[in-house]
Amino acid sequence: MLLKLRGRLSSRALIEDARQETFVRVLTTLKQRGGLDRPETLGAFVNSVCNNVLFEMYRSEKRTTPLDDDAPEPPDAAALDVETNLMRDEDRIRLKRALDALPPKEHELLRWLFLEERDKDDVCRRLQIDRSYLRVLLFRAKLKLREQLEGMDKRGTR
């Protein structure tokens, strides 16, 4: 595992973080009832958990890449033309209709996370679910929202 991490991560701190996260996940799984079915698969299991941790680290690095210093200034709000404002209003109305058409659970989840920007741990406590299951629920809610929006496009509803 250490050889894999050294080859793929640039700093010692990242390597140590990945090792610790991998071992925490493996030990958590082993402590759970049913844990690992066959002891001879422990090595492969640790390797696959390590791969998952690496992929998560890669994704988080991509999300936090700093902007260039010479990035263009955001446009002045007053300078936006009327047509752009109308299109934004239409998009907001369309999104609100699609959200309203979702089942209450999905609607509430998307509203909490994206509109109210609540902390994910707070949402998990409120829904009494595990953080990993929140990702599943969020994926499903986004998928249903996308289907609603595509359905609106097919019907010509704006």
Image (cartoon, rainbow, N blue to C red):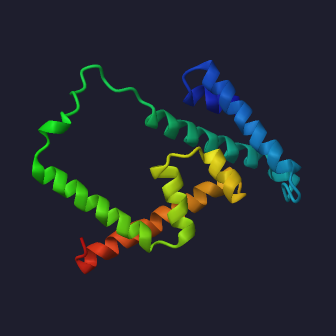
Q: In the image, is 115 to the left or to the right of 127? A: left
Residue occupying the point 44% across, 36% down: 62
- Residue 5 in percent (x, y) is at 63, 30
From the viewer's perspective, is residue 41 above or below residue 108? above
Q: For residue 71, what is the image quadrant?
A: top left
Q: Is residue 152 above or below residue 53?
A: below
Q: Nearer the viewer, residue 63 or 80?
A: 80
Q: Outermost residue toward the bottom?
A: 155
Q: How many marks?
A: 0
Q: Position of residue 44 (x, y in %)?
A: 74, 48
Residue 96 sits in quarter: bottom left
- Which sits in the foreground, 93 or 58? 93
| Location of the N terminus (image quadrant) | top right
Tell me what residue is drawn at x 74 percent, y 49 percent. Answer: 45
- Quarter of the image with the C terminus is bottom left
* Left or right: 67, with 81 as reference point: right
- Left or right: 15 as drawn, with respect to 143: right
Q: Nearer the viewer, residue 32 or 70?
A: 70
Residue depicted at x 10% and y 46%: 81
Vertical placement of 74 versus 68: above or below? below
Q: Position of residue 100 (x, y in %)?
A: 43, 70
Q: Position of residue 65 (x, y in %)?
A: 41, 30
